[in-house]
Amino acid sequence: MNDNNPGITGLILAGGRGSRMGGTDKGLQNFHGLPLALQTLMRLQLQSLPLQEVLINANRNLAAYESLGVPVWPDSIDGFAGPLAGFQTGLERCETPLLLTVPCDTPLFPLDLVERLYTAMNAQDADIAMAAATEADGTVRPQPVFCLLKTELLESLVKFTQGGGRKIDAWTGQHRCAIVPFDLPNDSTQAFANANTLAELQQLESL
């Protein structure tokens, strides 16, 4: 595969309980008139480095997600085990060398996300490239659900989750991880703003 098309599958993480949103299915909440998961899918389709395929990880309302026109897979680990369960499902289903993960509740993420993570992964010879956002106070904070992963990490992740591991940073810390700050002058400070509550969703819509 050439460098311009490295073979990347996108994975939208929509498998959570939505507990801070009153138990509603977050990915199906409307943002500017369209479900968040669809907004996320459209943003993935506009990436400057194109993806080969997009999958959705969801554990409820599967028919509603399937109506968005891409394959939908529930967690292979029972019990709403968190984002790593989604990572594992994506790695199991991914047919490309690389998997990009994005959450369904952050609809303004950068359109050059894939390109910059891929560039950093190559430059640093990393197994994982993770986005980092600049906070209001100027600190740069990793965004562990925005990851580019080598598909060969599946075995390591299965071992970690089978051992009861659930924290993303505890697992990514076992591998060479490139942290990619989105802190250039043209980068939006709201690019990684996410909606955990309906109030936060309304706030995002007003931006």
Image (cartoon, rainbow, N blue to C red):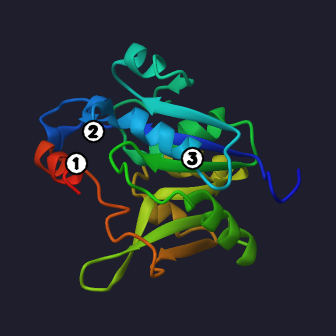
Q: Are marks 2 and 1 in contact (CB under 8 Å)?
A: yes
Relative placement, left or right, of 43 versus 20 is right
Q: CA distance from mark 3 to mark 2?
A: 17 Å
Query: Outermost residue toward the right?
Result: 1
Q: Residues within 10 Å of mark 3 (few under 14, many from 20)?
A: few
Kind of element beneath mark 1? helix
Residue 133 visible within the image:
yes
Q: Where in the figure is residue 111, as x and y percent of width and height?
A: 53, 57
Q: Earlier in the sequence, mark 1 or mark 3?
A: 3
Q: Which residue is mark 2?
A: 31
Quadrant for residue 177, please give it. Answer: bottom right
Q: Which residue is mark 3?
A: 46
Disc assigned to residue 205: 1
Q: Where in the figure is residue 44, as x and y percent of width and height?
A: 54, 45
Three-letter amino acid code at the position of disc 1: Glu
Out of 71 and 175, give the one closest to the viewer.
Answer: 71
Image quadrant where one finds the C terminus: bottom left
Residue 196 visible within the image:
no
Kind of element beneath mark 2? strand
Residue drawn at the location 50% of the way across and 32% of the way down: 56
Kind of element beneath mark 3? loop
Residue drawn at the location 57% of the way across and 61% of the way down: 112
Q: Are marks 1 and 3 in contact (CB under 8 Å)?
A: no
Q: Residues within 10 Å of mark 1 (few under 14, many from 20)?
A: some
Q: CA distance from mark 1 to mark 3?
A: 20 Å
Q: Earlier in the sequence, mark 3 or mark 2?
A: 2
Q: Is residue 200 above or below residue 29?
A: below
Q: Where in the figure is residue 188, as x and y percent of width and height?
A: 38, 69
Three-letter amino acid code at the position of disc 3: Leu
Q: Where in the figure is residue 120, as x and y percent of width and height?
A: 66, 73
Three-letter amino acid code at the position of disc 2: Phe
Q: Is residue 10 above or below residue 63?
A: below
